[in-house]
Amino acid sequence: MKSKIQKAKKAKAKAKSVKKVTAPKRTIMPEDMYGTINVPQDRAVPFGAITPAPVRQQELFITSNWRIVRPVIDHEKCTRCFTCYIACPDACWSFNQKEEKMEWNWKFCKGCQICINECPADALKAVPELDFEDGVVRLEKPF
């Protein structure tokens, strides 16, 4: 019995001798380091998917300068499954309810071809950007 009492007393003594240590509060970034970096928005974000949909319509966010291919839709093959709309990281596709067809906004497309690869109806084709002039498709081959 004495051994149990002695063990309990030793345990209490050890518990009293343990010091509580608290770590100093740390901040990830000091308050004086917060600020704004002035970078043109068309160069700051490489993907339009990061840009909110209403804002992406502004001229500031036109990102089609480096596109080398352009998706062209065959409206007869299109099943209106909206896969191109869902897959597009730049939110370039929209549905025209009056004409009941998909429309492509060329200003924000980067030519990643995700929509072309995801289309189950094979209604989209990649056409080289050089085949276009002011939004008109040239049907003749240049060479």
Image (cartoon, helix red, strand yellow):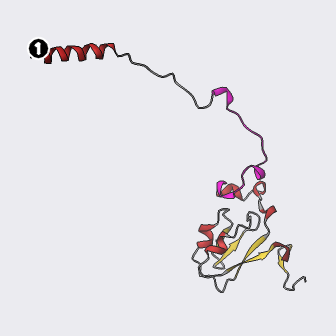
Where is residue 127, by image quadrant?
bottom right
In this image, 5 relative to 33: left or right?
Answer: left
In this image, 93 relative to 1: left or right?
Answer: right
Q: Is residue 95 magenta?
A: no
Whole-percent x and y of residue 96? 65, 74
Query: Is residue 132 in view?
Result: no
Residue placed most toward the observer, 78 or 66? 66
Where is residue 104, by image quadrant?
bottom right
Disc 1 packing (10 Å; few <14; some 14–19; many ≥20): few
Q: Quadrant of the C terminus?
A: bottom right
Query: Is residue 28 in view?
Result: yes
Residue placed most toward the observer, 11 or 137? 11
Residue at position x 85%, y 74% in the image: 130
Whole-percent x and y of residue 31? 63, 27
In this image, 77 relative to 66: left or right?
Answer: left
**What amino acid is found at the position of numbered circle 1 in the picture?**
Lys
Whole-percent x and y of residue 119? 62, 76
Q: Quadrant of the N terminus?
A: top left
Q: Is residue 36 magenta?
A: yes
Residue at position x 29%, y 17% in the image: 15
Residue placed most toward the observer, 118 or 75? 118
Where is residue 140, by image quadrant?
bottom right
Residue at position x 77%, y 71% in the image: 69
Helix, strand or loop at mark 1: helix
Residue at position x 61%, y 73% in the image: 118
Q: Is residue 32 above or below residue 123?
A: above
Q: Which residue carries the number 1 mark?
A: 2
Q: Which residues are magenta?
A: 30-50
